Amino acid sequence: MSIDTAVVLAAGEGTRLRPLTRNRPKPMLPAANRPIIEYVFDALVAADVTQIVVVVGYKRDRVRDHFGPTYKGVDLTYVTQHKQLGSGHALRQARTAVDGPTLVVNGDRVIDSNIVRDVVEEFERTNEPAMAVLERPETSQYGAIVLHDGDVSELVEKPDTDEYRLINAGVYAFESSVFETIDETERSDGELALTDTIGRLMDDGRVRGVRTEGMWVDATYPWDLLTVADEVLARGHVDEPAQSEAVWVDPAANVHDSAVLQGPVVVGPDCEVGPGSVVGPNTALGQNVTVGANATVQSSVLDTDTRVAPGSTLVDAVTGQDVTLGAGTVVPGGRADVRIGHQVFEDQRLGAVIADRVTADGDASFAPGTLVGPRAHIGTSVRASGTVTEGAEVIR
Amino acid sequence: MCGIIGCVGREDETLDVLVHGLSKLEYRGYDSAGVALSGDRVDVCKKSGKIADLRGALESREIGGAAGIGHTRWSTHGPPTDANAHPHLDCTGDVAVVHNGIIENYQSLRDELVSAGHSFQSDTDTEVVPHLIEDALADGADHEAAVREAIAQLEGSYAVAVVLSGDDTIYAARNDSPLVLGLGEDAYYLASDVPAFRDHTDQVIYLADGEFATLHADGWHVSDVDGDEVEKTVDTVEWDPEETGKSGYDHFMLKEIHEQPRAIRQCLRGRVDELTGSVDIGDLGDLSPTGVQFVACGTSYHAALYGAQLLRDAGIPAQTFLASEYATAPPPIGDALVVGVTQSGETADTLSALREARKRGARTMTVTNTVGSTAARECDHALYIRAGPEIGVAASKTFASQLTALNLFSLGTTRTSDSREIIGALRDLPSNIQAILDESNAEAVAETYVDSGAYFFIGRGLQYPVALEGALKMKEITYKHAEGFAAGELKHGPLALVTDDTPVFAVVTGDGEMARKTIGNVKEVEARDAPVVAVTDGQSDVERYADAVLEVPETHPQAAAMLANVQLQLVSYHVADKLGRSIDKPRNLAKSVTVE
């Protein structure tokens, strides 16, 4: 039976990516310079899906405003999960919008269309529920899988041993009867997990595990957006036309003749890149970003509407939307221990994460590992470090 | 965006099914509508105006047939008149055609047909199709072959449906315009969009470009360009597709309010360069007008008031006139450029004012959202606001885009010492509006004042048109009494209306002389116990005198108007929503007012 419908789960905030998720859910954070979920939609469209049901919840306006009613000619239907009570609960919200077999895909990870196609093929061949399985070292962060003759024989969420080598890629194909199986699935800790439903399907029959490969990139923490961008740029998965090798510039961007773009680099529409500036390598500029004269930006992800004033230096920086950095801002970059709550992440590559609508006056600098919350104001010549909370006023 | 509906196999109910379908397609925009039914002959009834006008015209007619087609039109070629409404007939009256899309080669086809002796009744591109079919029939082709032959000659985008006298079949084809078939029990439907027949069936077939369909009470058939049968899959629709157009929002208006950041990006794209402080509006940049007279109606009039002020600030004499007044009592024009601001490009009053100006030898320009509209075709110049389609009758995003485009016009045609600052502020607009959408407390303000007796809006300078627009939105969608005033004018009369049951929305941005004076006016109403809602960027101390505050980001004074307006849009929307009003289609109002 052929599959032309997909449900994309995009309701969760992705709390570990705070403070970048203050105004939008994780699927809307940038993979290089496009929202992560756009890559998911692209993969589905390439696999001939003709109807996409998007389960939205946290800050859902942002998803709906960005895409509207269609994506590349494919109808988008939005259903709302008002409370985020697990992935099975999220999928259940799509029940009335789905008729027949359906793909189910997490909306918060960049995936390749191969992965989708392989799952569809296996499902159509066997008429059994199917899920994509990838060989990855980091099994402890995901669902680990053990296969037996192509059937999933074990599915362990975030195992604390390293004996596993296969993970659940979050791409599934089900008959519409999956909704009944969800109904029969028991909640654990108040949440209804899709993997528990898959466990039931395994008990009742077979679940095919489809060994596949291709781009599959996830951001768990804010600084992961840097490596996500690296990977996307390395594969050239950007919308903008190539100006030269690994230099992609939107036709509606203004790049001064004396500015230097060092690939891999992508410059989005409406950007202004000033004279004498150096942008790249491994850098992504979203829509309508300004890089002022003589500024240097490398190994950074600057999201939509970010303003970088002249003479600034940004290395390993991640900015949210509408961030304004004054003249001579310095993010020297490098590795640092990053503290989030009581957890310390040692030796992470992170210049600074600067969340939506932060403004920094001139001559501010950010020590490696700095996390700045939304709407914080960093005064002139401040040396910021550690964690700056939302709306904080930091003066020297 | 026109809409098509067709139906076979419903016998006496055919007409009802068609008219019901048209009403479901009204959201696509409408300025005229019509139906054709085929039995022994083809009966046509069509009317400019709403579906209700068509219903009225049908009451006095006996019209029936087993196969029927209908159309709701949103003018592209030719004004919305009865003659330009679809369906269109051939010379014999035996062939009726409805069409959605634009036939690019219609002029050459029409010239050939006219020289071959065909007589045309309308200005539309569509009318070539029935005449082409007529010719093919005259050459001996059967019905299907004749329709195919005609379709083969068309270039451009089309969804076409045809009925012929003495034939219970509908013939249809598509290229680049949507067309979907509906399969019922012994009855079949076709439409531009599923809602048109969703009440009759949920079984649908989506036609692909280049496909040709025949529908008959006995069945349906889809074939390709060469006539070979195409295997189609039948889909079941569960959801109400009209809702998807709203992207999950309750109303188009709220969706469109949220689309403003994107609309403004589109308006600015490729037109501004902050590095050099330059604006590129093509050959409009060479206009260098010595004077400008704006003509407009409604929301566009408020945009024009703003535009005239920008030009005056840049040293160019500029005035704004209500188009309906200008048309009948025009002022001396001199060598002024006359600029008609009209979202649809079809506003009858504005067209009439522009025609009057042209008659007097004036150069004309339009600021419009609609490429190919009458205003765009008739004026010497056109500046497109690129807001994308707006379906809510009350204008929201198009006002923001009009103000943005008028900034481009002012910057592009006048000499300003340094445009970089204002260009920077325009580039910041999308993110500033997004900040308002993310943080606004307008719903809480609406909740507090939803039961008030009347609403007043005051502002000065560039915020005066915003006050007027705020009041107009409130009137349009809440049906409550609302007025906007220049802040200084309040004490010259309207203050008598102010009571503790009439909230006053005061738009105060910046901290200059205008802000100080408006705060003086705020104190006047506060002394009459009126609740004060301040829309402010926090630079002045107006908050001290306000009962509620709607915050906007701090920006350039020219951009502050767009920001304040978003807060007022949201207040009106939420008041209307709480009152349960028909927000997208307010009573008595139409999206594009094509009558004078």
Image (cartoon, coloured by chain):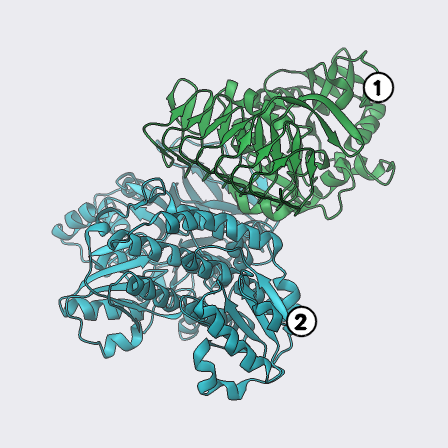
Which residue, given by chain and number where applicable, does mark 2 sit on?
B448
Which residue is painted at 58% across and 30% down in the image?
Answer: A40
Quadrant (top left/top right/bottom left/bottom right) for the C terminus of chain B: bottom left
Q: Which chain gets the cyan colouring?
A: B
Residue B526 versus residue B144 in the image, above or below: below
Marks 2 and 1: same chain? no
Q: Residues within 10 Å of mark 2 (few under 14, many from 20)?
A: few
Which residue, given by chain and number where applicable, does mark 1 sit on?
A160
Residue A258 versus residue B529 in the image, above or below: above
The subunit carrying tag 1 is A
The spot of residue A21 in percent (x, y) is 65, 40
The spot of residue A380 in percent (x, y) is 55, 42
Left-right relation of B59 to A153:
left
The spot of residue B273 in percent (x, y) is 34, 42
Query: Does the image show residue A142?
Result: no
Q: Which chain gets the green colouring?
A: A
Cα separation between marks 2 and 1: 54 Å
Q: Amino acid at mark 1?
A: Asp
The spot of residue A305 in percent (x, y) is 49, 41
Left-right relation of A208 to B492:
right
Which residue is painted at 35% across and 51% down in the image?
Answer: B99
